[in-house]
Image: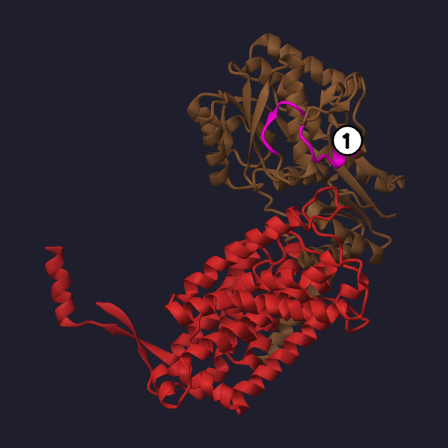
Chain colours: A brown, B red
């Protein structure tokens, strides 16, 4: 038995070394996921990005990943494991990995780290995020055109700046078409829970909204909207399959473009630590095809998208009042990134009290 | 026909010792077949799982870190379960201990003193013990089922933590993200070795396990726990109070879970956030049973379970399999260990009694 065990371990060790040797000449670009890579939402979008990266570089790179990594001490271990296994760059794809990423990065100055949606950087740690609010603004405009009642329902996840920023952008976009437009919000307190999200959708529809949008990851709200015969917007992925007659458009996270860009920079030696906040023009997010709407609405949406891409339109352009009636942005003034990233107030037109 | 488990009159000590190894061998064989069916190299997988993590100083540290809360909670639970009190809510006591212990570094963050850390640990234990005191009170005074009440309190603790980090304790420097401010250096459990990040939490775990082992083995209290656990009536004749035992065992296991909570938050996370435990309080139940409710066994079981987590990650990375595969593998291990243990204490009997057969037939007609 002992001999057998010895034989087993040595042969395994040899195999292990062989695998390690063949991997030497490939650049390792590694990924840490908070969820399952087939979650249909946030993590899946990152995994599709990883696959796009792999396809772009083919044999030149390897893209190992760890999924379902809890935010906490496990994250630090997982990230350190990546750094130890010879990764040249590690993408940590959840806000909760921030401190762990910074800690590990201190120990591995030669490895580059990219942390999604965070705000702490280091010489070898960059942050990246997507200007989802640009897509929300377009959705708001479409909602205002399509809604009969002038009220949309918004299924929100957690009251963090990212989500509040999305709600405000949606409202502001809608009000640029219909100044009286209102939005009702339900906080589902989850990113991923089909049951809760469906309940929230039903509750909103019962309260009389006739357009639904969501900042949660499953297709459950889209399915409820389809059953009740109202229109809705998809989130993170193109959800057209869940509502062929229902989806107006969706904000699709196309991280792959960003991953390809940064990997190229790494290989050229031009990578540097930055706080990157890319938008529609950079291709980090894209709008799913505008469907189930009249041609004039579609035309408006496409024009707005083009204007945002060209820089002609900043979705957060004044005048904008806060919910309490005080002035936030003057006529023609645009919001700066710092304010947006720390946004903890509603603008006028949101029919909800922000949880504090 | 039915299948019965019948208690063996004299379980074999030889097989009792051998049982974990048989279980391991079975896991290796079935797990190997599973990896082979997935088209992965089974030897490489098993190597990454069981051997590789033991060869690296770094991963030994990681195993110790992962095992510390499991052992700390597990030994407390072993006392509880021995005394026939079923505290299922260690996860909640872990969280409440973490919150109570964090009062010092979060609310009084301007107070810098060497007393910060000891106070945190004490508060953590008190927090966990008080929270376990709720089901203890309900059971001792109203005969409420502690399995249900302690389990339900877990959800309350989780939501309370969620509320407190989004609300009153939210960091002013955190862009409104749901985290508290980071703990100051004097509020962080120190690392014990230069070679890795194992912290004092692991020492607490080992010391707690040894102390409880001593108590169970050499003190009257230990005898009281065993007697009351096996037969409350016999315990009463010996003058032991099962009511006081409810309080003792629940408060003890709660305090240890609370200590695990604050040690984890202080040593590894350095702040509070909505989720601070990947289910340590529940996994520790498995650890307690895997260690056969013996404190020394709990140490071993905690380390083995930690190894499967760390090894599971290694397999994910080297073979690029889903983490579900490693969970299945963990499940296999637990299944074989528990079923081997069961078969040592019991034997399977297939009952072919005429009466039941006739009844079954009657039912069919």
Residue B232 position by quadrant: bottom left
**Above or below, comparing residue A277 to residue B221 in the picture:** above
Q: Mark 1 sits on what residue?
A: A278
Of residues B46 and A172, the one nearer the viewer is A172
* Image point (41%, 69%), residue name: B139
Q: Does A59 sit left or right of B141 as displayed? A: right
> Which region shows up in magenta?
A339-353
Query: Does residue A4 lie above or below A180 as drawn?
Result: below
Report if residue A340 lies within the magenta region.
yes
Asked whether residue B83 appears in the rendered view, the answer is no
Q: Does A245 appear above or below B39?
A: above
- Farthest residue in the top direction? A296
What is the x, y in percent for residue B220?
A: 50, 90
> Which image quadrant is residue A340 in?
top right
Total marks shown come to 1
Q: Is residue B43 left or right of residue B3?
A: right
Residue at left offset 61%, top offset 17% = A142
Q: Main secondary structure of the magenta part?
A: loop
For label 1, count other residues whose C-alpha is less than 10 Å away and answer few (under 14), some (14-19) or many (20+).
some
Q: Is residue A226 visible?
A: yes
Residue B305 percent across, percent down from the top left: 58, 68
x, y percent for residue A317: 76, 20
Which residue lies most toward the right here? A269
Quadrant for the N terminus of chain A, please.
bottom right
């Amino acid at each position: 038995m002992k001999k057998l065990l010895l034989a087993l371990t040595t042969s395994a060790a040899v195999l292990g070394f062989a695998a390690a040797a063949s991997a030497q000449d490939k650049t390792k670009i590694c990924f840490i996921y908070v969820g399952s890579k087939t979650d249909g939402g946030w993590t899946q979008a990152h995994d599709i990005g990883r696959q796009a990266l792999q396809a772009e570089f083919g044999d030149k790179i390897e893209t190992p990943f760890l999924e379902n990594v809890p935010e906490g001490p496990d994250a630090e271990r997982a990230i350190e494991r990546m750094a130890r296994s010879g990764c040249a760059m590690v993408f940590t794809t959840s806000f909760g990995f921030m401190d762990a990423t910074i800690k590990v990065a201190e120990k591995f100055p030669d490895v580059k780290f990219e942390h999604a949606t965070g705000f702490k950087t280091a010489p070898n740690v960059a942050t990246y995020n997507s200007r989802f609010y640009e897509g929300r603004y377009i959705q708001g405009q479409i909602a205002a055109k399509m809604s009969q009642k002038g009220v949309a329902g918004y299924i929100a996840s957690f009251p963090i700046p990212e989500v509040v920023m999305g709600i405000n952008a949606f409202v502001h976009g809608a009000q640029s078409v219909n100044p009286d437009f209102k939005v009702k919000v339900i906080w589902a307190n989850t990113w991923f829970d089909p049951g809760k999200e469906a309940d929230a959708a039903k509750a909103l529809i019962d309260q009389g909204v006739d357009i639904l949008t969501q900042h949660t990851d499953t297709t459950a709200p889209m399915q409820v909207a389809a059953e009740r015969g109202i229109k809705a917007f998809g989130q993170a992925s193109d959800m057209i399959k869940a509502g062929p007659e229902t989806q107006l458009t969706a904000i699709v996270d196309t991280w792959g473009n960003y991953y390809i860009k940064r990997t190229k920079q790494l290989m050229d030696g031009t990578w540097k630590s930055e706080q990157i906040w890319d938008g529609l023009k950079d291709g980090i997010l894209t709008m799913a095809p505008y469907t189930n709407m009249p041609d004039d609405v579609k035309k408006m949406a496409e024009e707005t998208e083009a204007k945002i891409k060209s820089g002609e339109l900043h979705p957060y352009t004044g005048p904008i009042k806060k919910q309490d009636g005080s002035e936030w942005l003057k006529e023609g003034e645009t919001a700066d990134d710092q304010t947006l990233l720390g946004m903890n107030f509603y603008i006028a037109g949101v029919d909800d009290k922000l949880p504090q | 026909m039915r299948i019965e488990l019948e208690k063996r009159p004299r379980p074999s000590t030889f097989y009792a010792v051998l049982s974990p190894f048989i279980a391991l061998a079975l896991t290796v064989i079935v797990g190997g077949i599973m990896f082979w069916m997935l088209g992965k190299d089974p030897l490489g997988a098993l190597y990454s799982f069981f051997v590789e993590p033991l060869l690296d100083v770094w991963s030994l540290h990681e195993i110790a870190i992962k095992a510390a809360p499991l052992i700390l909670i597990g030994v407390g639970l072993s006392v509880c379960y021995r005394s026939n009190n079923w505290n299922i809510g260690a996860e909640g006591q872990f969280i409440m201990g973490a919150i109570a212990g964090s009062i010092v570094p979060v609310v009084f963050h301007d107070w810098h003193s060497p007393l910060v850390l000891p106070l945190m640990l004490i508060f953590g234990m008190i927090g966990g013990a008080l929270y376990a005191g709720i089901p203890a009170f309900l059971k001792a005074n109203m005969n409420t089922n502690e399995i249900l009440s302690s389990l339900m309190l877990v959800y309350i603790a989780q939501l309370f933590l969620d509320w407190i980090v989004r609300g009153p304790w939210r960091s002013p420097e955190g862009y409104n993200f749901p985290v508290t401010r980071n703990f100051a250096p004097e509020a962080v459990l120190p690392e014990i070795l230069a070679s890795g990040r194992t912290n004092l939490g692991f020492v607490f775990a080992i010391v707690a396990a040894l102390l409880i082992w001593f108590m169970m083995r050499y003190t009257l209290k230990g005898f009281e726990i065993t007697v009351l656990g096996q037969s409350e009536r016999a315990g009463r004749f010996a003058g032991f109070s099962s009511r006081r035992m409810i309080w003792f065992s629940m408060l003890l296991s709660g305090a240890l879970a609370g200590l695990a909570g604050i040690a984890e938050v202080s040593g590894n996370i350095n702040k509070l956030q909505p989720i601070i435990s990947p289910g340590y309080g529940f996994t520790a139940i498995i650890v307690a049973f895997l260690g056969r409710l013996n404190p020394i066994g709990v140490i071993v079981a905690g380390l083995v379970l930690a190894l499967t987590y760390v090894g599971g990650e290694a397999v994910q990375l080297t073979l690029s399999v889903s983490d579900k595969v490693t969970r299945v593998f963990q499940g296999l291990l637990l299944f074989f260990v528990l079923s081997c243990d069961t078969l040592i204490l019991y034997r399977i009997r297939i009952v072919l009694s005429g009466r039941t057969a006739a009844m079954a037939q009657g039912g069919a007609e």
